[in-house]
Structures are given as structure tokens and as C-alpha cells.
Image: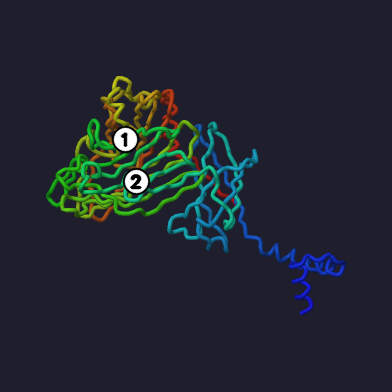
Amino acid sequence: MRTAGHLRCWFGLGLHSHYYMGWWLALGVVLTPLTALAAPPTYEVHFTVQTGKRARQYTPVWAEVELPAPLSKVPPEALSVQLVEAVSGQTVPAQITPAPEAQRKAVRVWWILPACPAGEERRYRAVFQRRSREEKAPAPHFHWRDNPGQYLDLLWDDRPVLRYMYAYDPQRREETYKTYHHLFDPVGKRLLTKGPGGLYPHHRGLFIGWNRLRYDGKTGDWWHMKPNGTCQRHERFLRQEAGPVFARLRCLIHWNDPQGQPVLEEEREVTVFRQPAPTMLVEFVSQLHSQRGEVRLEGDKNHGGFQFRAANEVSQRQGETRYLFPSGWPGPDKTVGLPWAAMSFALGDSRFTVAHFNHPANPRPTDYSADRKYGRFGAFFKYTLPPDQTLTLRYRLFVQEGEVPPAEVLEGRYRDFVDPPPVVVQP
């Protein structure tokens, strides 16, 4: 009882007598090991990245790490990681996401490999621990801001980056009959992409569709959204992620027939990666599931697939638009089998280049629509989707403001997409 009384006096009254100082010294001996025991557990691991035979250009990379107990029981969003480049000692922005379902004890760590030449090695040290309640999100960083029922904005600090247009209103059918994504320019001043209205009002931002879908002995048009009542309707958000390395949005979309019944169910995932100004890197993944038996995706290269449509102003300045292709490619008359295509256009007082990369795992043959000077281009294919399968499509867009980049730069970006550098994980 006397000890408890002394503790109350020392903490509550701050007494300074030698008598109580003796108790303070004794108490310090006891507190030191208790403080050490209370420190949060940490886990250190090392990564090595080999650039390989080609130079790398701000490439997104990730490493999968199996965490020991008790960190393996901590939700990924409650973990923090400090990533340090071994040679320079510089801290590198890093972000944690869950690993695939099969690796329940593992997490993925993402970061951006800086521009570095071929044949180079980069080594990193990562320290994991549970995030404290007081620890704030690292700055600068991505974050989402919703305008409920209308659109969802992605921002980098206070700069707009991307806008998901998901409103659906039968009273505003022409305005809301398809979901799509707007892109802002790399400094957030204006939209690079087109919405409703203008030349070809059904072309909008980043969008996907086919003008001939065959199902149940019928044919529908999920490009122009015909006949009346046909639509792509946002159903719900599945996942939102944001941090210092990337932001990712996954949502469920129904491709409904005129009776309001889904023909296709789409899980669409769009990821924006951190990049140096004035560039942007956007990944588009679409998973299509049939809801009506076998579905045939048909049409032609100017009315199907994943597309980019520039702002309507581009259609009024068509003489300033040109297309770029891989080195040695014959040009827009030979578009079947193109791995990528790019469009350079004028908007306001600036010039922008958008490169559209087709992943080799997508259905073949791919035929690029890449000759429309008004600002719409993309990758088309035909495909029969069985009722028991999922069609996964993956594309990436690279955006740059300013002078048109050489084909070699775009080719390097494409190779970063289809053949990223491997990461070796060592304890």
C-alpha cells in the first residue's frame, strides 16, 4: 500500500525529495524492460531488382512477402512499411496490398522503380510493423472523393487525376447510358477526355463496348447503346485503394438489355500509378462474365474494344493529330497484330501523347483503330465467351504532355508493362 501511495504522490504532485527520487530510480529500472516489451513487433526483409536487358522507366514493381506471426494476423491496411534504397539510403514511397487469397499470410509491397539503365541492380531494405493509431497517411498521396450517385474523383493531394462517371438515370438516358472514366491532364488543369455531346456523343473518355453482341438468338449494341434501354449500369463499388504509390478502383457493372436484364457482368478495375510530371500511367482491367449463355463479341475495329476518346476540341483541330507506331511498323493500313499504338494531339496551348498498350494475354488477333484524327483510338477483337468462363482483358495507357516522345520511349514503356523486372525476396 505504501508503494502505491508513493507512486500516486510522485505522478500526481511531482515531489522532489531524495526519498522519492530513490523510488523514481528504482521504478526506472522496472519500466525499462516493460517499455521494450511493449514495442510493436517488426519484420525486416530485403529486395533485389534486376533491370535485365533493357532500361526501365519509372516502372511499377511489387514483391510478395510472407509475414511471421503476429504480423501475419494484422490486416494489410493496418500495416506500415519503411522501404529504403540500400546504396543511397533514401526512403522510397511504398504501399501494401493484400496478396491473392491463396496466400493469406502474405502481403504485396509496391513501389516505383526509378529510371535506370539496362543491366543494373537495385537493392532495398523493408521493415514492416503495425501502424500506430497516431500515424497518418504518407504525403503526398492519392485519395478518393465521391459525389454520391454522380461521379467519383481521384486526387493526388488536391490535384484531380481521374473521374469515374457512374450516374444512371433513365430520365437522362443519353447522358448516363454508359459508365466511363475521364482523365485529367498531368497537372490537373483540364480534362483530356470527352463526355456526352460533341462529335459522336457515344464516345466517352476511357470506355469499352461492342456494337454487336449476339446472345439468346438476339443482337444488341453496347457501343451506341441501342435499342432504347440498352445500357452499361454501375451496380456497386467493390474495392477502393489509395496510397503514395497508386490508387485502384474496382466496381461491378451490368451490361443490361432493353428489359433491364444483364447480358454481361463486368468487374472493372482501373489503377493509376505514381509518375513524375508531366506523365501519367493508367492500367485498365476488365473481367467479363456471361449472364445469358454463350455471348459472341463482334463488330469492327472502329466500333469495339477498349478505347480512348480525347476531348471534343481535338475534333475541331484534326490537322494537328497524328499517330505513332512501333519502329518499323508499316503504319495505319497494317493494324492487325499491333502491340501498341499512340496518338498525339493538340489541346489548348499544349500537346499530349497517349500510348495504348495491348497485353499479349488478351484475345488475338487484335486490330487497332488508329487513324481517326478526331481523337478516338483503341484495340478491337472478336471473341466467343462461354457461359462458364471469365474473359480478362488488360491494357495500359501512358500519357505525356509536351513534345512527342520517340517510338523507343513508348516501346520501353510497353516492355515495362508486359515484361516487368523480377523482384527477388530475401530475409
Residue picked out by circle 2 = 151
Q: Nearer the viewer, residue 131 or 385?
A: 131
Q: Position of residue 331 (x, y in %)?
A: 30, 24
Q: Is residue 418 visible?
A: no
Q: Position of residue 321 (x, y in %)?
A: 32, 23
Is residue 255 placed above or below 305 in the rendered structure?
A: below
Find numbered disc 1 in the image and state the secondary structure of the residue it sits on.
strand
Outermost residue toward the top in this view: 319
Is residue 108 placed above or below 184 in the rendered structure?
A: below
Outermost residue toward the bottom in this view: 1
Identity of the residue drawn at 66% across and 64% down: 38
Outermost residue toward the left in this view: 217
Residue flagged by tag 1: what amino acid is it? Phe
Find numbered disc 2 in the image and state the secondary structure of the residue it sits on.
strand
Tell me if mark 1 has few (under 14), some (14-19) or many (20+) residues whose alpha carbon lies within 10 angstroms of its own.
many
Distance from Cα at disc 2 to Cα at disc 1: 19 Å
Residue flagged by tag 2: what amino acid is it? Tyr
Outermost residue toward the front in this view: 13
Q: Position of residue 15 (x, y in %)?
A: 81, 66
Q: Nearer the viewer, residue 333 or 73?
A: 73
State if disc 1 and disc 2 touch (CB < 8 Å).
no
Q: Quadrant of residue 407?
A: top left
Q: Which label was assigned to residue 308?
A: 1
